[in-house]
Amino acid sequence: MNEIATNELEEKIAEARHKIVGASNIAVLTGAGISAESGVPTFRGQEGLWQNFRPEELATPEAFWKDPKLVWEWYEWRRNAVKEAKPNPGHYALAELENETPQFTLITQNIDGLHQMAGNRNIIEMHGNLWQVRCTKCGDLEENHDVPMAELPPRCPKCGEIGRPNVVWFNEIIPMEVIDGSLKAIEECDVMLIIGTSGIVEPAASMGLVAKQAGKCVIEINLEPTPSSPLYDLILQGKSGEILPLLYTTNRTYS
Ligand code: BV8
Ligand code: ZN
């Protein structure tokens, strides 16, 4: 990054820090990009492909009922990719920011559980969690961290029916309480951070627009511009694991 760009970014980081340190209520939306530096494959990145399947082809109820074993093998691959992953300085910075901000809500599209591992508490998992199995018949929900899993597809301990990953697939609606909780956090925040998301998948992709329509200050952190970048107040272009720790005062380093 050349001198001018660095100075420009530093100025923007100082401006963003000013907004954040002064805020009493912060809402954050994260996507796969915040976990990239932890080695978790993103969706649209080159490493997102699995056996030449596009995620949208496997993350659907249709694909699951057509071949439950194939879809579970894909989730087994992702569980294997995530099981060793550790939070990176970007995750830890958000946990620290929650400790320092009176009101803080973290809305994530990620199902990897790394925000919890980093210490965030007020988390809305908009698309579910990779480490939970839900029965397709009685709805029984089990926490399951076995990699590999005992059997694919797993069976429900209550009724014996096959289980599915407790995630929201394409063409499946997101639970109303999740949408309501996200919209409430955006309406009540002073500043919204949008981190590491390509802004393509709805309804998450419209949340920045909702914040702007509510007159909020929106700051985007991403390696590259996204379709909604022109709407936002500040664009910090770079790695979230390098930029987020710079966005508030405490200069604690993270190993
Ligand atoms: C629904 C869980 C009602 C499963 C996921 C309106 C218009 C068009 C289409 C629709 C619409 N409304 C609804 C739809 C359909 C669909 C949709 O949006 N389709 C898209 C493809 C157009 N939405 C739905 O189906 C939703 N349900 O709306 O229900 C309904 C139903 C039927 C019909 C109409 C309405 C449900 C969507 C949820 C799907 N489930 N995940 C699983 O994970 O297996 S989505 C999944 O993909 C992720 O959770 C995430 O949401 C998305 C991936 O996006 P990102 O996280 O942003 O990741 P990506 O790889 O794309 O980008 C990474 C970014 O990070 C990049 O910008 C990169 O530059 C950046 N980056 C990389 N490294 C770094 C970095 N940034 C900073 N630092 C770094 N180091
Ligand atoms: Zn069951």
Image (cartoon, rainbow, N blue to C red):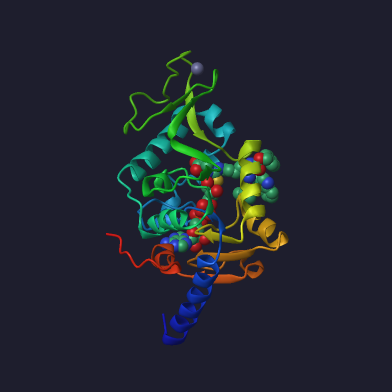
Residue 113 seen from this side: yes
Q: Is residue 173 left or right of residue 195?
A: right
Residue at 70% x, 63% y is 215
Quarter placement of the C terminus: bottom left
Q: How many numbered marks have been drawn onto this rendered protein structure?
A: 0
Residue that lies at the very extreme toward the top in this rendered image:
159
Quarter placement of the N terminus: bottom left
Q: Is residue 234 left or right of residue 157?
A: right
Residue 202 seen from this side: no
Residue at 30% x, 64% y is 253
Residue 193 image point, x, y percent:
55, 60
- The one nearer the camera, 120 or 176, is 120
Determine whether 194 is above or below 120 in the image: below
Residue that lies at the very extreme toward the right in this rendered image:
213
Determine whether 10 is above or below 91 in the image: below
- The one nearer the camera, 231 or 198, is 231
Q: Is residue 184 left or right of residue 7?
A: right
Determine whether 88 is above or below 169 in the image: below
Residue 244 image point, x, y percent:
43, 64
Residue that lies at the very extreme toward the bottom in this rendered image:
4
- The one nearer the camera, 155 or 52, is 155
Residue at 38% x, 29% y is 144
Residue at 53% x, 75% y is 15
Q: Is residue 167 left or right of residue 206?
A: left
Residue 25 image point, x, y percent:
57, 57
Residue 2 image point, x, y percent:
42, 84
